[in-house]
Each structure stands twice: as structure tokens, then as C-alpha cells.
Image (tube, grey):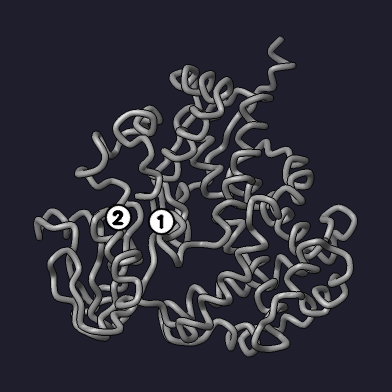
Amino acid sequence: MSDKSMEFYKDPVNFCTSRIHNTGSRVFQARLLNKPTVFVCSVKGMKEMLVDKKYHIVRLCPTREEAHLLRLSLMQLFKEKSLDAYGDYINSSEPVAIYRLFKRLATELSLGLFLNVDAEESAALTKQIIQLTTQHWHGKSTIILMVCPHMHLKKLFLTRLKLKLIGKCVQTCFNLNRFVNKIKNIPFPENTSATQHLLLFISALIPKALASLLTSFTLALAGSNQIHIHKCAQESEDYLNNVLLEVQRLWPSFIGGRRIAKQDTTLCGYMIPKGYSVMFIAFAVHRDPDYFDHPDEFLPERWSERNAGQENVLCCFGNGPRNCIGIELNNMIVKAAARYLLSHYTWSLDPPTQTLDYKWLPVSRPAEDPTIKFMSYFCQT
């Protein structure tokens, strides 16, 4: 009866902020998924968890050596030089809408990059893949998180869903696409590993993350009161970077990440027994008043003032040596879309008054999909 899973998933922001207030600490304990869990809501705690104690507090994954080698191999596909090969495809995108359409754009982008599937030329195939990946996402988020958190993702891919269609598509694309050609040359431990990773790359997870950030960016710069920020971001690459950092800080796509204490250890001076879960909460870490002045305000200038050079305190996509391998690709896509919007449009909420309260699961976004009116500079002149 002490399990707090439903309370957390119903409103994670209130769950964390109320306990931070009641305990007087940004590190506290509760029971989640029927397991004692330490919640980390401070930059210091997050850094200890993901960097300093990375071998004490770990993911449920293959052995450390296998995971390290696999990560090094996959990261080569997302390095800056590799990303240049995908630049033309990414920069051809023309986002002009809000969450639902951003998600559709990101989905088509993922299919094009990772499977060489053109959404216009292969509309029926695209629709089938989207339906399957959506089914997979719903199954993963409910089955793994709520019922059996230790189920291996690979087993779920093979037994929970009938993804033969995508698997066949992957096999036929091996000689057609740059990304597929590279991933097939990685020395995976099993023959099916390349296909499994490609299936993960085209899952609904990536489009949701991209749509989340682009939606928050659009809302943050909507309206006449943001004209100055809009103009500065349009004219200065550095300022645009600051805007996108601030969007990521205030509205990280994901709630956080969960690990298991492999041995007795400490975190911010608290004893963490072996076997306890440890979860960092990104939106709370990003609002740590010890690191951010006026933590709830949208202030891009902070990244060229007090927080200059402190981008590594963000954990939107994890932190430390086990962070997301696709961070550079994510930033490239988001920046390309933001540049396009800034150079072609001004925009505002239509109607002006809308409910913009955020939901945080499975990704952060307004609970009610906001509607935006975009005005092209051409039409205005």
C-alpha cells in the first residue's frame, strides 16, 4: 500500500516538488514499481549518480565490457563527420505546425534516415510501420514500466509484436542506405542485433522526443512579447544555441532515467543500499536553484552569463559516459528545424488563450495540443 507509482505517473511534477518541500532535500526516497527508490532532483546528485558512481549505480544491461564496446561501435554512426552525410536530408524538412505535425515530420525523418523509406513514395508502407512502432511504444511503456520492469527490450521486440514487416524492410535496405550499410558492419554479438537496433531507432520514442522539443521551442517564442528573442535567435547562432539550451532545460523531453544500485554506496551523503532503484528527475535537476538563478523563468541569456560553459549539467538525454548516443543528431535536427522556422515565419497562439499545462509522460508536451498560427515573412511583406 505504500507504493507511489500511480501518484508519480499521474503528476510527476507535483510528486517531486511536494516531497522536495516536505523533506527539505532534493534527494528523497519513495516506493516506485514496488521497489524502494531514491529520487535525485539536484545537479550534484545527478552528477554523482551518472558520472562519479557510474559503476555503482547501473542500468540493467549486458556486462560492462559488452555494453562499452557496443556503445563505442554505435557512437561512430552519430559522430559529427557521419552526421554530415545526413545533412541534406535533414535540412530539406519544412516544419510549419505544432506537436502532432512535428511528430509526423520526425517520424518520416527517422524512417528516411534509418530505413531509406520515403513517406511520399511509400505511403502505405510508411503507414504500416508507424502503426507497428506506435503499438510497440504503447506496449513498451505500459508493460515494461508498470508490470515487468526487468523484461529485456530485445525479448519484447521478438515476442510482444509481430514486426516481420519492418524486419523484412531492414533486410532489403542493407544495400541502399548509408546508415544501414554502416550499422551492418558493426561486430554485434548476434546476427539479429543490427535489425533490433534499427527497430529501436525507428520506434516512436525518437519522433516523440523531437516533437516535444520543437513544440516547446515554438511555444516559448510565440507571440509579440517574444519578438526580441525571436530576432536575436534569427540573427545569432550563439543566441539560438542558448535558446535551445533553455528549452531543453525547462522542458526536457523525458522525465529522467532509472538505475539500480549494484552495491552499497552513497549519494549526496545518503546511504543507498544494494538493490535500491535510483531515479534522476530531469525537470527537477534543471531547476536546481543552486545552479540556476530564477530557475522557473525562460532566460536564454543565462547560458552566456552565469551558466556559460555549463551545458554538461543538463540531463535531458542522460549525462556522463552512458548518455544518449544520438545527442548530436538530435541537436542537428532541432537546430535545422528551428532555423527554418525563424527564417521563414513569425507565429502566435491562435486562439490567443489556450491551456498550456504540461503533461510529462511519456514525453513532455502540453496536455492539450496547442494550435499555432504561422505567418510567413513573404506574406507579411
In the rendered image, which quarter is residue 12 located in?
bottom left
Q: In which quadrant will I find the N terminus?
A: bottom left
In the rendered image, which quarter is residue 172 located in?
bottom right
User: Does residue 366 appear in this view?
Assistant: yes
In the figure, is residue 80 to the left or right of 29? right
Q: CA distance from mark 2 to mark 1?
A: 8 Å
- Residue 5 in percent (x, y) is at 30, 73
Give me the residue at 55% from left, 81% from top: 153
- Residue 44 in percent (x, y) is at 24, 56
- Residue 50 in percent (x, y) is at 35, 65
SS label for mark 1 = loop
Q: In which quadrant will I find the C terminus?
A: top right
- Residue 65 in percent (x, y) is at 49, 82
Q: Circle 2 is placed at which residue position?
A: 13
User: Does residue 15 appear in this view?
Assistant: no
Q: Circle 1 is placed at which residue position?
A: 360
In the figure, is residue 133 to the left or right of 47? right
How many residues crowd around disc 1 within 10 Å: few (fewer than 14), some, or many (20 or more)? many
Which numbered tag is attached to residue 105? none
Give me the residue at 47% from left, 53% from top: 253
Query: Label 2 amino acid?
Result: Val
